[in-house]
Amino acid sequence: MSRPTLTNKVSKLICQDILAGEFKPGQKLVVAELKEKYNVGASPIREALVQLSWSKYVKLEPQKDCWVAPVCKEELNDLYESLRVVSSVLLKKAILAGNEDWELDALTSYHKLSHLSFNETFCWKEWEERHLQFHISLLEGTDSKNMFEFFRDLINQIKRYHYFAMATLKSESDVLFNIGEHEMIMKQVLAKNSEEAISLLDNHLLNSMQRIETAIDIAKQSQRS
C-alpha cells in the first residue's frame, strides 16, 4: 500500500476511534502504542496525526506531545456561532437557486433520517451519519461553493462533539432524537418559505448546541466525583 493511502487509512482509523470514544478528549496519543494498535510503522502514524490536527481532532506540538483535542464550551460556542451564520446564508441561497434534483436529494435524506426509530435497536452512529447527510443535502443547492466548503469543515469539527454528547448522555440520549425539528425545516424548505426555514434551522442548531453543553457539564461533574 502506498504511503499516502496508508496514511489516510490510519488517519481514518484513529478518527473513528476518537468518535467512538476509545480515545477520550484530552487523552495523550503515544506513537509507540498506536503503532502496536494499528500494526503500522511510526511514519504513517505521525503523518496521520498531522492530518487529524488539520481537522482539529487532535492537538499536536512538534517535538512534544500529541493528544486528543479536548471538548469545551468556548470552542463549541465559537463553532456553532459560525455554523448558524453560514447555514442561514446558505439555506437562503439554496432555496433560491436549488432545482428539482436538489429538492429530491434533500427530501430523500430527510426520509432516510425519519425512518430510524428510537427503540432498543436504535443505532446512534447511523442516526448521526444520516443526520449529517440531511444537513449537507439541505444546503448543497447553493451556488456559493467556497462558503459551502467552510460549512463542511465546521460540521466535521462539530461531529466530534455530537459523538461525545451521544456517549455522555446515554440514558437520556433520547433528547438528541429530534426528528420533529427536521420535519418542520423540510416542510418550509419545500414550500420555499425562506424566512421560516432559516428561523427553524437556526433554532435547531441552537438546541443542538445546548444539548452538547449539557453533555459537557455532565462529563465535568463525573470527573469531579
Image (tube, helix red, strand yellow):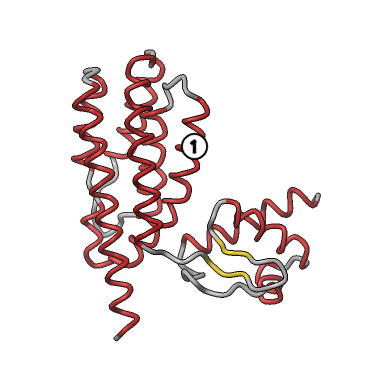
> Could you classify mark 1 by the number of other residues whose Cα lies within 10 Å: few (under 14), some (14-19), or many (20 or more)?
some
Whole-percent x, y for residue 137 in the image = 40, 30
Q: Relative to the observer, which residue lies in front, 107 or 132?
A: 132
Give the structural element (helix, strand or loop) at label 1: helix
Whole-percent x, y for residue 161 in the image = 39, 57
Q: Look at 40% across and 53% down and name the residue there.
A: 125
Number of numbered discs visible in the structure rendering: 1
Q: Relative to the observer, which residue lies in front, 8 or 203?
A: 203
Whole-percent x, y for residue 211 in the image = 25, 57
Residue extending farthest to the bottom is 225
Q: Look at 67% across and 57% down and name the residue there.
A: 50
Q: Amino acid at mark 1?
A: Phe
Residue 138 vs 202, above or below: the answer is: above
Residue extending farthest to the right is 2
Q: Relative to the observer, which residue lies in front, 155 or 16?
A: 155
Circle 1 is placed at which residue position? 150
Q: Horizontally, is 19 left or right of 53 in the view?
A: left
Q: Horizontally, is 96 left or right of 70 in the view?
A: left
Classify the position of the C terminus by image quarter: bottom left
Whole-percent x, y for residue 180 in the image = 18, 40
In the picture, residue 224 is in which quadrant?
Answer: bottom left
Q: Look at 23% across and 49% down and name the residue there.
A: 207
